Each structure stands twice: as C-alpha cells, then as structure tokens.
Image (cartoon, helix red, strand yellow):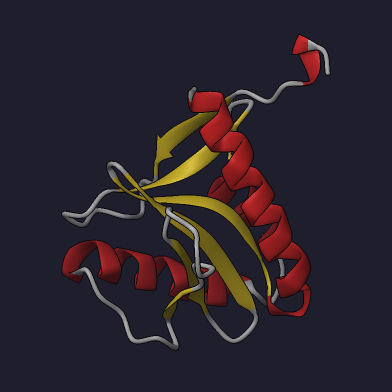
Amino acid sequence: MTKQNIPIFGARKIDAVTGRIPVRQLSINGIGQLDAFEADLKDTTYLPEYRTLLTYINFYAENGTLPPNKMKDITPGKATVKEYEFRTKHLRVYAIHGKEGKLILLCGYKNTQEKDIRKFRSLKERYFESLQ
C-alpha cells in the first residue's frame, strides 16, 4: 500500500454532544464519520431518528449510562478494547472506549448491521495501528 492510500485518522469534537464524558468522532482524511452519516441522511425519513441518536449520545455523555436497548456493549469475548452500539429502530452508531472517553468509528443501519460491525472492527484495528 502506498502512502497515498493510507488513511489519516484523527478524533474530532461532536458539537451536539456537550456532556462531561468526552465523546468524539473518528475523522478519516479530515471527514468526521458522524458528520458524513448526518449528511447522507439529509432529506430522508431517518433524520429524526438520527437526532434521537444524538440525544442518546448526549445523555450518555451527561450521565454515563443508558438502557441496553439504547446503548449495548458488543465487545467480543477476548477483546481488550470495549465496543458499544448506540441504537434506534433503524440506525446504529458504533463506538469504542478509548483513553479519553468514547470514540465513534462508524454509523450504519440495522439492516446492514452484520456488515457494519465487520467494517467497524476493521476500522478499529486500522485506527489503533495508526497510533503506533
């Protein structure tokens, strides 16, 4: 893989999340994953559900907990980094627990959940490799 093909990862603030627990979004080549998902949802029936997800994320950032039907631990058995899924009826936001709170890596839909979780875990690996 050439240097041109290697993604540049970063973590960006989420303006809509103002709680005491930091929640950031993964940035790939300068594009925030949550921001890109929101842009994709523009003019769709899912936009109100997306706003509900942001409310859940902000509630988590304020209080540190959510019920399992809103935020679920999806960490595989032997994984050392905790994985979480914020969820609504049709939308999913996948995050990890990092040194400075939660980091949102990927967003997706319930009907593509299995594929999205594989992509999420691949992104997680690539993100941690980029930190070394």
Given residues 45 and 105, the one toward you in this image is 105
Q: Residue furthest top?
A: 3
Q: Is residue 83 above or below residue 12?
A: below
Given residues 100 and 12, the one toward you in this image is 100
Measured from the top left, where is residue 82 in percent x and y?
42, 60
Using the rendered image of the protein, determine whether residue 21 is visible from the camera's viewpoint. Answer: yes
Measured from the top left, where is residue 18 in percent x and y?
24, 53
Decide if residue 65 is on the left or right side of residue 57: left
Q: Quadrant of residue 4?
A: top right
Q: Quadrant of residue 50?
A: bottom right
Residue at 50 percent across and 70 percent down: it is 77
Measured from the top left, where is residue 80 in percent x and y?
43, 54
Decide if residue 77 is on the left or right side of residue 23: right
**Looking at the rendering, in which quadrant would you find the N terminus?**
top right
Residue at 49 percent across and 22 percent down: it is 132
Given residues 50 and 22, the one toward you in this image is 22
Q: Residue furthest front?
A: 78
Residue at 40 percent across and 86 percent down: it is 68
Using the rendered image of the protein, determine whether residue 31 is visible from the camera's viewpoint. Answer: no
Q: Is residue 16 above or below residue 90?
A: above
Q: Is residue 113 above or below residue 16?
A: below
Measured from the top left, where is residue 120 in percent x and y?
64, 55
Q: How many marks?
A: 0
